[in-house]
Image (cartoon, grey):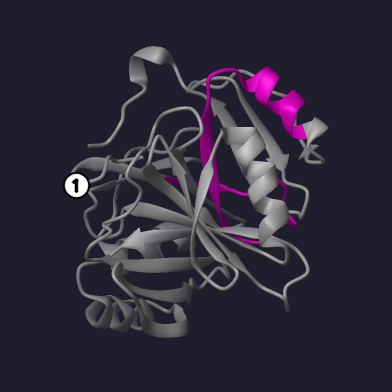
Amino acid sequence: MPKAGRYREGVPCWVVLTTPDVPRAERFYGALFDWEFVPTGPGEAVATRYGAQVAAITSSPVTPAAVWTTYLACPDLRRTTAQIRASGGRITREPYEVPDQGRAALAVDPLGAPFGLWQGEAVEGAGLVNEPGTPTWNEHLSPDPDAARAFYRHAFGYGYDRPRAGHTLARVAGLPACSIGPSDTPQATAAWRIQFGTADADRTAARLRSLGGTVLTDPEPTPFGLSALVRDGAGAEFVLIAVPPDESAAAA
């Protein structure tokens, strides 16, 4: 995940957990990632690690299952929302103010994958990435990766490397931003998936189980590190991925 200060338009810059039980989520992720929490409103909090903001948690009493949402950076929400509509996407929540932080909106792409938009002001995005307990990568998975690539190219100007095993590295201004690829199963719906770093994927997966989470796929080697698909106690899926010590990087 790009460091703070380098969040160009279309680059994942922030992640938000929507959950029916914020205190339960705070206990779970506090124990899993050593996060601390700063309340920002009724049923809302920002998660921090070493004092840096890494994610947010908000309540959703009407949604029984929890879900992580990826937010893409944009310098001009009005222009970006218009471009999303022109590209075949939908805006599900019009731009709104987040006091003392920035402006946000919610959207759904033509494949049905929800995502957020963030126009940072005082808070540009995550202040710490690519370390254990912080966001490291975001990927878009769908039954039709070609359609997804076309949408994000038109809406955000993504460029793409040559596909590898159906997955494509997306770039913004030549720099890696995220990846787009096929869903794990043909029946799966389109979604953005978030990866969080860990110093030890096996140990963190075992801790997640002890906290009431579910390990959907045991840690296994990937070209980028040992990783496991997991689910928290309220149903939100994410990936644990081992962060090599020489690639850990804190954002200033």
Establish if 86 lies above or below 137. Answer: below
- Count neighbours of disc 1 (C-alpha within 10 A) and say few if under 14, some if 14 to 19, many if 20 or more: few
Observer-nearest of 58 and 228: 58
Q: Is residue 96 above or below residue 221?
A: below
Circle 1 is placed at which residue position? 5
Vertical comparison of 217 with 56: above or below: above
Q: Quadrant of residue 127?
A: top left
Which residue: 47% across, 63% down? 147
Is residue 79 found inside the magenta-colored segment of the image?
no
Does 122 appear above or below 233? below
Horizontal and vertical percent position of residue 95: 36, 82
Image: magenta residue range: 179-208
Measured as percent of width and height from the top left, residue 123 is found at 28, 59
User: x, y (%) of residue 126?
Assistant: 35, 48
Identify the residue at horizontal 54%, vertical 66% (top origin). Answer: 44
At x 59% / y 20%, what residue is drawn?
226
Q: Total of numbered circles in the picture?
A: 1
Hey, which residue is sitting farthest top in the picture?
246
Left or right? Give the position of 235 relative to 114: right
Q: Nearer the viewer, residue 80 or 158?
A: 80
Magenta segment: does it hold 195?
yes
For label 1, the SS is loop
Horizontal side, residue 231 vs residue 43: left or right = right
Tell which of 51 and 123 is nearer to you: 51
Query: Which residue type carries mark 1?
Result: Gly
- Quadrant in the picture for the N terminus: top left
Percent across and percent down for residue 18 are 61, 64
Residue 97 horizontal side relative to residue 236, left or right? left
Which quarter of the rendering shows the C terminus?
A: top left
